């Protein structure tokens, strides 16, 4: 079939200009020593998840506004109003978890089966860089909804960066865009999440795949990683099919999860809340728990020294471990340290959950936070209630715009706020049209009630024409 296609005039024309047949040949006819296996599906599974993250991410970015006043409202809008918005947002959030899990399996497998051996040092390092980039994506993405848990978890995360000796304060200010968290923090996290890190990820995914193809598949654990001896099988069709089946199962599972249990959004971040207990995404829990052990003067060791040593060991691994032996049982040191680290992480994660459920004060606060999220999810979306009347509302009609001028000229804004949102000297006027019809409004403005006069509001003395304009402005405050 491929050869028939190759010999059409159009394909010859295209190939002479692009070399496309050579490329598809390279891509599909890659030899796999020992043949296709289900064990090899994780790397390409990651590519499929990346693709899904891009598609859902672009969709979310079309609605999202990265500012402290609007971010939460726009995410609420996606979650409660937009058709399939909650589904797509859930896909994106579950996708990030799936990415981390699949990445850990891929990394663990490469380590455990010694597939980093045999001239694969740079390939291994590009993988480690991709790993940290994905962790960076998870960290920067978590803040964007600007709800309570996003805000307080990121406050913790950036504070940890502040503990780094010498450059800590600078690092923290760089992430936050100042000393406090606000619109600049969101804007920086957004830029990192949609431009900087993804751009770098594309670069390294390209590098990683290129280097993988250059080194060739390492094959099963009893295979020589430099000069394979087992009978090879081509990547296409069997491995392609297996990869595809795995991707379908992955994406299908994510879709089912998103449909059955959509991701929630909590109430908007309230920086003055002193009770809120931040809890990170589950895959950060072991690290979160780990940091509890390193308070005060010892913090540097837990935050910088030990993670630094682990990272350095990982990078150095293919340089230190030069033997070509790949069977785990013949590499006791490597396998044993792998098992210890894995058990350690599982234990820390378990301990974090255990401490939360056994401390009554903590457990109570966490239940309260869950209830607040439920309550928030059950309230209807009302953009005007979120302190951002202009967000999705239509622009003012010409009359209302002129009326707004009358409103300002008569200093109504002094007590009722620039957009009628209210100040401490006067109530909000948003929705006031529901209270008074036109004639009643004229009456109450000409003859303010006792309460209004007590609040120092003078009778409104303007022409009938201005009065009509003013009222059309008041009616537009919804
Ligand atoms: C000195 C402050 C002040 C200024 C200036 C002021 N108001 Fe008021 N206004 C008040 C207070 C206080 C009340 C509410 C009294 C109460 O508790 O019912 C009020 C109530 C109102 C109400 C009724 C709201 C309701 O929900 O019942 C309207 C309408 C209103 N103001 C319109 C205006 C307009 C239009 C202007 C400008 C011409 C204006 N106000 C200027 C203080 C002010």
Image (spheres, rainbow, N blue to C red):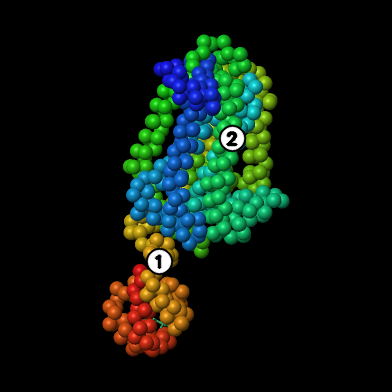
Q: Position of residue 125 (x, y in %)?
A: 63, 31
Asked where in the image residue 268 lies, by quadrant, the reply is: bottom left
Which image quarter has ligand 1?
Answer: bottom left
**Label number found at residue 204:** 2
Provide residue 200's location: percent of width, then percent of height: 59, 40
Q: Nearer the viewer, mark 2 or mark 1?
A: 1
Q: Quadrant of the N terminus?
A: top left
- Out of 419 and 385, give the one closest to the viewer: 419
Q: Are marks 2 and 1 in contact (CB under 8 Å)?
A: no
Badge number at residue 395: 1
Mark 2 CB lies closer than 8 A to ligand 1: no
Q: Position of residue 330 (x, y in %)?
A: 59, 17
- Asked which quadrant contains residue 215, the reply is top right
The answer to which of marks 2 and 1 sits earlier in the sequence is 2
Quarter of the image that includes the C terminus = bottom left
Direction from residue 50 to residue 172 in the image, left or right: right
The residue located at (49%, 33%) in the rendering is 47
Q: Which residue lies at the image location 57% right of the left edge and 10% below the top edge?
A: 229
Disc 2 and disc 1: Cα gap in Å?
45 Å
Regarding residue 289, the answer to whether it shows in the image is no
Number of numbered markers? 2
Which mark is on residue 215? none
Q: Is residue 250 left or right of residue 32?
A: left
Quadrant in which residue 308 is drawn: top right
Please say if 129 is above or below 13.
below
In the image, 16 versus 38, the foreground residue is 16
């Amino acid at each position: 079939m491929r050869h028939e296609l190759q010999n059409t005039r159009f394909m010859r024309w295209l190939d002479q200009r692009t070399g496309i047949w050579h490329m598809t040949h390279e891509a599909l006819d890659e030899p796999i020593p020992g043949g296709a296996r289900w064990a090899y599906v994780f790397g390409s599974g990651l590519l499929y998840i990346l693709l899904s993250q891009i598609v859902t991410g672009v969709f979310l970015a079309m609605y999202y506004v990265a500012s402290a006043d609007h971010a939460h409202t726009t995410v609420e809008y996606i979650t409660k109003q937009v058709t399939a918005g909650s589904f797509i947002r859930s896909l994106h959030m579950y996708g990030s978890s799936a990415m981390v899990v699949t990445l850990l399996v891929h990394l663990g497998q490469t380590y455990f089966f010694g597939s980093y051996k045999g001239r694969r040092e740079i390939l291994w390092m590009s993988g480690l860089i991709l790993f940290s980039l994905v962790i960076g994506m998870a960290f920067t993405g978590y803040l964007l909804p600007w709800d309570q848990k996003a805000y307080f978890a990121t406050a913790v995360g950036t504070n940890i960066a502040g503990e780094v000796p010498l450059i800590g304060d600078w690092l923290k200010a760089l992430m936050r865009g100042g000393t406090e968290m606000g619109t600049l923090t969101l804007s920086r996290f957004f830029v990192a999440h949609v431009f900087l890190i993804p751009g770098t990820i594309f670069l390294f995914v390209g590098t990683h795949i290129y280097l993988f193809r250059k080194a060739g598949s390492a094959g099963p654990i009893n295979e020589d990683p430099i000069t394979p001896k087992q009978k090879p099988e081509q990547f296409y069709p069997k491995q392609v099919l297996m990869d595809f089946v795995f991707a379908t199962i992955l994406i299908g599972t994510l879709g089912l999860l998103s449909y059955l249990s959509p991701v929630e959004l909590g109430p908007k971040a309230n920086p003055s809340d002193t009770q809120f207990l931040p809890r990170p995404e589950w895959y950060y829990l072991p690290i979160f728990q780990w940091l509890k052990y390193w308070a005060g003067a010892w913090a540097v060791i837990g935050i910088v020294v030990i993670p630094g040593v682990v990272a350095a060991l990982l990078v150095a691994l293919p340089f230190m471990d030069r033997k070509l032996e790949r069977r785990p049982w013949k590499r006791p040191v490597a396998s044993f340290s792998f098992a210890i680290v894995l058990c350690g992480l599982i234990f820390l994660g378990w301990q974090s959950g255990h401490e939360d459920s056994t401390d009554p004060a903590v457990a109570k606060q966490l239940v309260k936070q869950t209830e607040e999220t439920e309550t928030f999810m059950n309230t209807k979306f009302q953009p005007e209630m979120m302190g951002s009347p202009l967000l999705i509302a239509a622009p003012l009609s010409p009359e209302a715009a002129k009326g707004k001028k009358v409103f300002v000229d008569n200093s109504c804004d002094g007590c009722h706020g620039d957009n009628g949102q209210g100040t401490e000297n006067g109530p909000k006027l948003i929705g006031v049209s529901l209270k008074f019809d036109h004639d009643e409004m004229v009456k109450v403005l000409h003859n303010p009630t006792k309460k209004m006069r007590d609040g120092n509001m003078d009778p409104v003395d303007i022409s009938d024409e201005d009065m009509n304009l003013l009222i059309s402005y008041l009616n537009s405050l919804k």
